[in-house]
Amino acid sequence: MICPRCGMAMIVMELDNIEIDHCFSCGGVWLDTGELEKLIKDYSSGMVWLTELIPAEESSEPRLKCPICQKEMEKLVWALEEPVTVDRCPEGHGVWLDNGELAAIIRQGASIDSQIASLFEEIFQKI
């Protein structure tokens, strides 16, 4: 898969049947639909997280294209203590998280399985 942010090839990492497409060039992460929910230990919390995303009013970031369907993704904000802007495919293929955004989500209370959190800490060095 090609990174929607920088155009470099991404590496697929897998842990407990969860595939994470990671760009080592820009540090971004692509999660297919359902993968974010699998990462979040409490599934109901995952669903709450997804429903709390609101459209970003304005963003200085360029609009990215979905790496699967090439349609322009929508910018959504998860607005808690530290707002996180994510890109979501309008066709429901998945979510793009720029470098540090997955770590910010985890820091703000998403309950992540400790094995997965350890992997993120080792790879992303942001948690």
Image (spheres, rainbow, N blue to C red):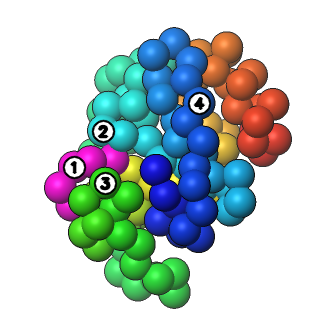
Is residue 122 found left or right of 48 in the rendered image?
right
Q: Nearer the viewer, residue 88 or 12?
A: 12
Identify the mark nearer the N-term, 1 or 2.
2
Q: CA distance from mark 3 to mark 4?
A: 17 Å
Comparing marks 2 and 3, which lies closer to the viewer? Answer: 3
Q: Closer to the observer: label 1 or label 3?
A: 3
> Depth check: 18 or 12 in front?
12
Q: Amino acid at mark 1?
A: Gly
Q: Is residue 98 visible?
A: no
Q: Nearer the viewer, mark 4 or mark 2?
A: 4
Q: Is residue 39 left or right of residue 72?
A: right
Q: Quadrant of residue 72?
A: bottom left
The answer to whether residue 25 shows anywhere in this view is yes
Q: Which residue is mark 4?
A: 13
Mark 2 falls on what kind of element? loop
Is 104 placed left or right of 123 in the picture?
A: left
Question: Three-letter amino acid code at disc 3?
Answer: Ile
On screen, 117 above or below 56? above
The numbered dot on residue 32 is none
Q: What residue is at 47 percent from the left and 83 percent from the top?
A: 62
Q: Name which residue type carries label 4.
A: Met
Distance from the alpha carbon under mark 4 to that under mark 1: 21 Å
For the residues labelled 4 and 2, the Cα–Cα distance comes to 16 Å
Task: Identify the residue under disc 2.
Answer: 33
Q: Which residue is mark 3?
A: 68
Main SS, magenta residues: loop
